[in-house]
Image (cartoon, rainbow, N blue to C red):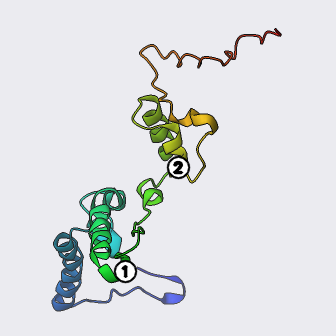
Amino acid sequence: MPLGGGATIQPIPISLRDAQYVEGKQLTAIEIGRIVDVDPVLFGGSAMESDDRGGVERFLRFQLPPRLRRIEDALRADGDLFGETDMYPEFEVNELTYLDPLKRAQVQHQQIQNGSLLVDEARADNGRPPLPNGQGQIPQVVPVGGAPNPALQGEPDDDEEPTNE
């Protein structure tokens, strides 16, 4: 292929031995990932070597928590560290399990609506204090049809005008 000034491109040959070495290195990333049950993307392998592109999220959700629990259990079992105290080690990984803040908010919203999560629990997960007067302890189950929960006794509905009596 001619270039300007009479220069040409010449391919640099690679020996079969070098080609096999490179291929072996790629295989190593895949094999190590299988041995330690970690997606190769997590330690420098390419996404093409991975079983799927959700490897990081899968690792954070399903593979990392059991490993961290084993570390917490080992630390708790050490009498020198936590023997006579009511303290205990715990890894905070909630921020890691949801890579997208919008997705996290949507999941929490759905959990609150279906009653599997209280408002105060969601607030605690987000580092916020509970609502006053126990309001965050009331399940916010949305019945079929989407009607909101009835107003608590002693509180006026938002649609009603307050009466002066």
Residue 39 picture location, percent across and down? 27, 66
Nearer to us of marks 2 and 1 is: 1
Label at residue 57: none
> Which residue is identified by label 1?
81
Q: Is residue 97 left or right of residue 48?
A: right
Q: Nearer the viewer, residue 165 or 121?
A: 165
First in residue order: circle 2 vs circle 1: 1
Image: 157 above or below 128: above
Label 2: how many Cα within 10 Å (few below 14, some 14–19, many 20+): few
The dot on residue 124 is 2
Q: Secondary structure at mark 1?
A: helix
Q: Which of these two is toward me, 51 or 81?
A: 81
Question: How far is disc 2 from disc 1 in space, using C-alphas?
Answer: 27 Å
Answer with the quarter of the image where residue 75 lies.
bottom left
Residue at position x 60%, y 17% in the image = 153
The percent coordinates of residue 32 (x first, y second) are: 20, 76
Residue 26 locus on image (x, y percent) = 23, 77
Counting from the top left corner in percent of width and height, residue 62 is at 28, 57
Q: Residue at x 53, y 41 (%)?
A: 120
Q: Quadrant of residue 56?
A: bottom left
Horizontally, is 26 left or right of 82 in the view?
left
Front-lying residue, 127 or 133: 133
Please give the name of the residue rendered at 32% of the width and 68% of the height, measured from the top-left corner: 68
Q: Secondary structure at mark 2?
A: helix
Residue type pointed to by label 2: Ala
